[in-house]
Structures are given as C-alpha cells and as structure tokens.
Image: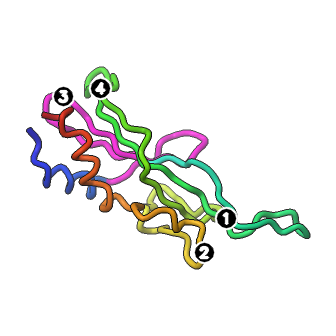
C-alpha cells in the first residue's frame, strides 16, 4: 500500500509535461506499486469573457478555464484501470498569447488578476486537490 502523505507529496512535486495536441493539456506521471501509473493533469475547457467591445468586435477581459482530471493506467499495456474526468476542480488563466511555454507551471501564470471571471474556482492549484485525488484513488491502489 502506498503511504498517503508520500503520494500527496509526489502529486504536488512531480513536474507537469505538455501533452501534444491542439488544446492546452498538461500531465504528470507517477509510478505506483504493482505496475500502475497515476496520471494527474488538466486540460483546457473553454474561454470565458466578461464582455464584448462592439466597436472593435473583440471580447474583453477573457480567461481560459481548465479542469483537473486523474487516471490510473497499467504501466505496461497503458490500459485505463480507473479514471476520474468528471471532477469539479478547475482554475482559470489569463488568455494571453504565449502565456504558457514548455517551462511554465500553474504557479507561473496563476489566476486572472483584477477580474471576477475566476471567482468560481477555489481549488485551483494541485496543493488544494492532492488529498482529494489520493482519497479518490485509495481503493484502486491498495
């Protein structure tokens, strides 16, 4: 059985890797006991804007919303053994061209400052949800 505190620490400290694809998607891979791999990631859900400038035809004060997910896979076959993609955990980031890079982390970009677009998210960083992830997958890793 995996120690809860050690697993939470690994979830928090393991680096995120950019997933190839058209949307902004990042994952971290954590090797577990018994040939299993825990994947924790977040993916772009959509764009949220506060308003629309009729003169320029552009949206104003926009943010991109992201949603956290996790899954357990067989390390050899990569078959999904358990997944939770229906979480209520998410966060927002400023909609800035080039805001994310291969070296970026959530902490680098963070919540949208000075706007109320992201007040719905109070569990935005991995530190906020690591215990929930471990509690959710506990039966799967015992």
Quarter of the C terminus within the rendering: top left
Distance from the alpha carbon under mark 1 to that under mark 2: 9 Å
First in sequence: mark 4 or mark 1?
Answer: 1
| The quarter of the displayed image where residue 138 is located | top left
Residue under label 1, please give it. 62
Asked if 24 appears above or below 91 in the picture, the reply is above
Q: Mark 4 points at which residue?
A: 81
**27 left or right of 74?**
right
- Separation (CA) of disc 3 from disc 2: 44 Å
Check disc 2 and report the residue beneath it: 115
Q: Are marks 1 and 2 in contact (CB under 8 Å)?
A: no
- Which structural element holds mark 2? loop
Q: Earlier in the sequence, mark 1 or mark 2?
A: 1
Q: Residue at x 44, y 40 (%)?
A: 86
The span from disc 3 to disc 4 (Cα, nearest Å) is 11 Å
Q: Give the range drawn in magenta.
A: 15-41
Q: Residue at x 21, y 53 (%)?
A: 8
Query: Of circles 3 and 2, which is in front?
Result: 2
Secondary structure, mark 1, is: strand
């Amino acid at each position: 059985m995996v120690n809860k505190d050690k697993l939470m620490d690994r979830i928090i400290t393991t680096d995120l890797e950019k997933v190839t694809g058209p949307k902004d998607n990042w994952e971290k891979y954590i090797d577990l006991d018994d040939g299993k791999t825990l994947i924790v990631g977040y993916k772009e859900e959509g764009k949220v804007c506060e308003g629309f400038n009729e003169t320029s035809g552009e949206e104003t004060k926009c943010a991109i919303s992201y949603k956290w997910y996790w899954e357990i896979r067989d390390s050899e076959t990569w078959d999904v053994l358990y997944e939770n993609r229906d979480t209520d955990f998410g966060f927002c980031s400023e909609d800035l061209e080039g805001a994310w890079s291969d070296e970026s982390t959530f902490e680098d970009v963070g919540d949208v400052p000075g706007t109320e677009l992201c007040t719905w998210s109070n569990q935005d960083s991995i530190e906020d949800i690591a215990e929930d992830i471990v509690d959710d997958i506990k039966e799967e890793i015992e």
